Image (spheres, grey):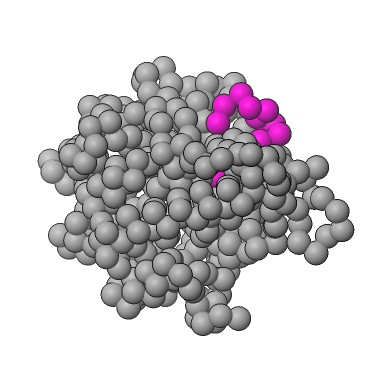
């Protein structure tokens, strides 16, 4: 067991750039904020399994294919990214660094990747997109949305994302209720400190002037609400938090432009499977009709390439970006993205792949098993 595992229960990067940034972030952050970023629901089984499951998989390289230098670019709804490593939506970046989401947005834009900005950001979406576009005029920012039980509130949020210039919506579907997170309960961490707020929630219908509305989670939400959203926006909609193949098919039927296989980084249903273990059944059900993305437990280029080989079009990274942000602000996020993208290019080359799509499911095998797992 590594030091990090001994203290958190989660097998984490302890060496290399990510390990260095993680250590620095931990030393800098208030313990309750570190726990909010790092923790998961229940016994943190899903959180740990997301990482461990990648460790159970190996890659079979293909040889002598004359593939040349690999191209890491990917084509996605509302974005062309120069790397398959996207920034997953995470709340409250100003808890990590005083520049908050602006720093994350600048680093994402400079790296040519997509920032999926959280509805629970501590910077208003218009300012997040503006920060990205100062670096790159065509920077792609997607807006992560929790559908709100009040349709007028959802509508106002969507208008804000559209007016800000977001190029897609990501509807998080895995949160009919808040996850129960023991670390936050133990620390009494349930709200932002004074001076910080979920800025997108200000000035919405039903809120007192200039006061932020609480983000509502509701088990009454259904596909009808998604349909309602689709009728009210031209933006492509990706559904995040899909783990069951029937839900993947259903989302396609409702006009989803993409799916994100996710268990919310182990922060919602602790009994959920590791995302990389759920991925093959989803890509099989989707059969190439829309792009399938994955997040949860991505900590290396080999993890990225494993997900790509199992049919993901791209991946999202949550906690490592927060480590970079807390440790070194914009430069730290840039280091995380450069490291993971560099490793991905290297692993693609070692696997004989010319680009992110030039991989096959039969190249992923279970460690310790006789024969090929994927085939
Ligand atoms: C601190 C934190 C805050 C998060 N906030 C959100 C959020 O606001 N909306 C959302 O859809 N997912 C949220 N997530 C989940 C991430 O989008 C993503 O699914 C997860 O972090 C991926 O796993 P990883 O951290 O192992 O990369 C959050 C995750 C963390 C760690
Ligand atoms: C503040 C929450 C709504 C953000 C979230 O989704 C999370 O912490 O996992």
Q: Quadrant of the C terminus?
A: top right
Which residue corresponds to the image point at 64% horizontal and 48% vertical from the top-left? 351
Q: Viewer-proximal residue, 181 or 6?
A: 6
The furthest residue to the right: 370
- Check residue 288 for magenta coloring: yes
Is 282 left or right of 118, judged from the image as shown? Answer: right
Which residue corresponds to the image point at 30% horizontal and 68% vertical from the top-left? 327
- From what the image shows, is residue 15 above or below residue 171? below
Image coords of residue 201 (percent x, y): 25, 42
Q: Viewer-proximal residue, 281 or 230?
A: 281
Image coords of residue 105 (percent x, y): 27, 46
Q: Viewer-proximal residue, 210 or 330?
A: 330
The furthest residue to the left: 209
- From what the image shows, is residue 94 above or below residue 188? above
Image-quadrant location for residue 242: top right
Q: Can residue 271 be seen in the rendering of this structure? A: no
Image coords of residue 20 (percent x, y): 40, 72
Image coords of residue 361 (percent x, y): 71, 41
- Check residue 59 for magenta coloring: no
Q: Quadrant of the N terminus?
A: bottom right
Instruction: State how many labels appear.
Output: 0
Which residue corresponds to the image point at 50% horizontal and 63% vertical from the top-left? 40
Which residue corresponds to the image point at 22% horizontal and 49% vertical from the top-left? 102
Residue numbers of the magenta segment: 282-294
- From what the image shows, is residue 123 above or below residue 167? below
Is 230 left or right of 308, judged from the image as shown? Answer: left
């Amino acid at each position: 067991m590594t030091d990090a595992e001994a203290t958190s229960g989660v097998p984490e990067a302890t060496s290399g750039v990510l390990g260095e940034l993680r250590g620095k972030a931990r030393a800098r952050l208030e313990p309750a904020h570190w726990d909010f970023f790092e923790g998961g629901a229940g016994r943190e089984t899903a959180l740990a399994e997301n990482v461990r499951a990648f460790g159970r998989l190996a890659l079979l390289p293909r040889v002598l294919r004359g593939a040349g230098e690999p191209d890491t670019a990917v084509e996605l709804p509302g974005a062309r990214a120069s790397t398959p490593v996207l920034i997953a939506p995470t709340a409250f970046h100003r808890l990590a660094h005083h520049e908050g989401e602006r720093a994350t947005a600048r680093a994402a834009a400079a790296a040519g990747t997509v920032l999926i900005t959280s509805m629970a950001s501590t910077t208003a979406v218009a300012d997040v997109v503006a920060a990205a576009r100062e670096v790159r005029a065509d920077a792609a920012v997607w807006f992560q949305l929790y559908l709100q039980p009040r349709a007028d509130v959802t509508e106002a949020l969507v208008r804000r994302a559209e007016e800000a210039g977001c190029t897609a919506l990501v509807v998080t579907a895995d949160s009919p209720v808040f996850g129960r997170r023991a670390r936050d309960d133990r620390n009494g961490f349930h709200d932002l400190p004074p001076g910080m707020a979920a800025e997108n929630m200000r000035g919405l219908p039903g809120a007192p002037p200039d006061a932020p509305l609480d983000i509502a989670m509701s088990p009454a939400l259904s596909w009808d609400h998604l349909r309602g959203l689709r009728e009210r926006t031209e933006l492509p909609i990706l559904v995040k938090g899909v783990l069951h193949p029937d839900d993947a098919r259903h989302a396609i039927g409702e006009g989803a432009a993409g799916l994100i296989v996710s268990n919310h980084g182990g922060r919602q249903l602790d009994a959920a499977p590791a995302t990389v273990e759920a991925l093959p059944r989803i890509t099989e059900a989707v059969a190439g009709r829309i792009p399938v993305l994955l997040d949860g437990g991505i900590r290396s280029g080999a993890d990225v390439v494993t997900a790509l080989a199992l049919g993901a079009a791209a991946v999202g990274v949550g906690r490592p970006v927060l480590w970079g942000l807390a440790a070194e602000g914009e430069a730290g996020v840039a280091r995380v993205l450069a490291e993971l993208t560099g490793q991905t290019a290297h692993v693609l080359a070692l696997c004989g792949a010319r680009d992110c799509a030039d991989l096959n499911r039969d190249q992923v095998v279970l460690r310790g098993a006789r024969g090929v797992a994927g085939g």
